[in-house]
Image (cartoon, coloured by chain):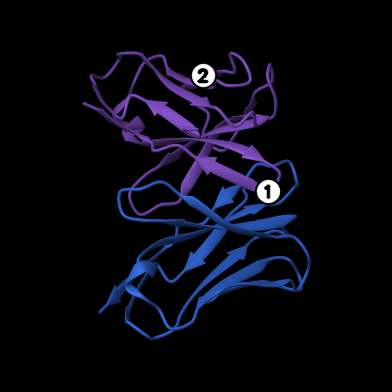
Chain colours: A purple, B blue
Amino acid sequence: NAGVTQTPKFQVLKTGQSMTLQCAQDMNHNSMYWYRQDPGMGLRLIYYSASEGTTDKGEVPNGYNVSRLNKREFSLRLESAAPSQTSVYFCAARQADTQYFGPGTRLTVL
Amino acid sequence: GQQVMQIPQYQHVQEGEDFTTYCNSSTTLSNIQWYKQRPGGHPVFLIQLVKSGEVKKQKRLTFQFGEAKKNSSLHITATQTTDVGTYFCAGDPYNFNKFYFGSGTKLNVKP
């Protein structure tokens, strides 16, 4: 039982490149979230999915797209990376009142 | 826009001293959650508060939700070195399960 897994752990991109961050959960939870965390700041919600097949924007959705492929997987895509997207990205899955976070992806955009 | 403010930003205490972090929202919250993040780690859920004036305890940790459901606090009694980390509050103003995080309080405990 791995909980929430994220790949990759680290990534360096050049400005304008695209990539997809992967997230999977084995807890059969309905809701999943993508957050970003910048130094000295709390987590900011990018997108979330209340259930399979549904997604909704959070606080900072610009520059990102998401796919809730099935109940297990929720991916985050950067179509054209920008230096402002350098951050640590956390995926979370929620059931009832508890959010379970993955280990994070540390992304640097040069 | 929705804002959740958290103070202080940093707190350095001697082991055995108490610690408190405060969270304030610009709007009434449906519920509030608290998380702990160790250095280099991911946030770990601690607790959720829902009711006005609610107080919950977990061993040395006491969580409070204000009467107006706009503020909350986390108090740690007799800190230990294992308490080191950053404590975040996260408020849900509309009960849509969209959470707005405070900027966190980083706690350092000197042995």
Identify whether A46 is placed above or below B60. Answer: above
CA gap between label 2 and label 1 equals 26 Å
Q: Amino acid at mark 1?
A: Asp
Look at 74% across and 71% down and name the residue there: B54
Q: Are dots 2 and 1 on a single chain?
A: yes
Q: Is residue A63 among the parts visible in the rendering?
A: no
Indicate the position of residue B72 as horizontal and vertical percent values: 62, 69
Q: Which mark is residue A97?
A: 1
Look at 37% across and 85% down and name the residue there: B16
In-front residue for pair A101/A27: A27
Q: Quadrant of the C terminus of chain A?
A: top left
Identify whether A64 is placed above or below B61. Answer: above
Judging from the image, mark 2 belongs to the subunit labelled A
The first of marks 2 and 1 along the sequence is 2
Residue A81 lies left or right of residue B70; in this view the side is left
Identify whether B109 is placed above or below A45. Answer: below
Residue B11 lies left or right of residue B92; in this view the side is left
In-front residue for pair B95/A95: A95
Residue positioned most to the front: A1
Secondary structure found at label 2: strand
Q: Residues within 10 Å of mark 1 (few under 14, many from 20)?
A: some
Secondary structure found at label 1: loop
Judging from the image, mark 1 belongs to the subunit labelled A
Q: Which mark is residue A62?
A: none
Question: Where does label 2 land, which residue?
Answer: A65
Look at 31% across and 75% down and name the residue there: B109
Indicate the position of residue A1 as horizontal and vertical percent values: 50, 32
Q: Is residue A5 among the parts visible in the rendering?
A: yes
Q: Residues within 10 Å of mark 2 (few under 14, many from 20)?
A: some
Indicate the position of residue A104 as horizontal and vertical percent values: 38, 36
Residue B69 lies left or right of residue A94; in this view the side is right
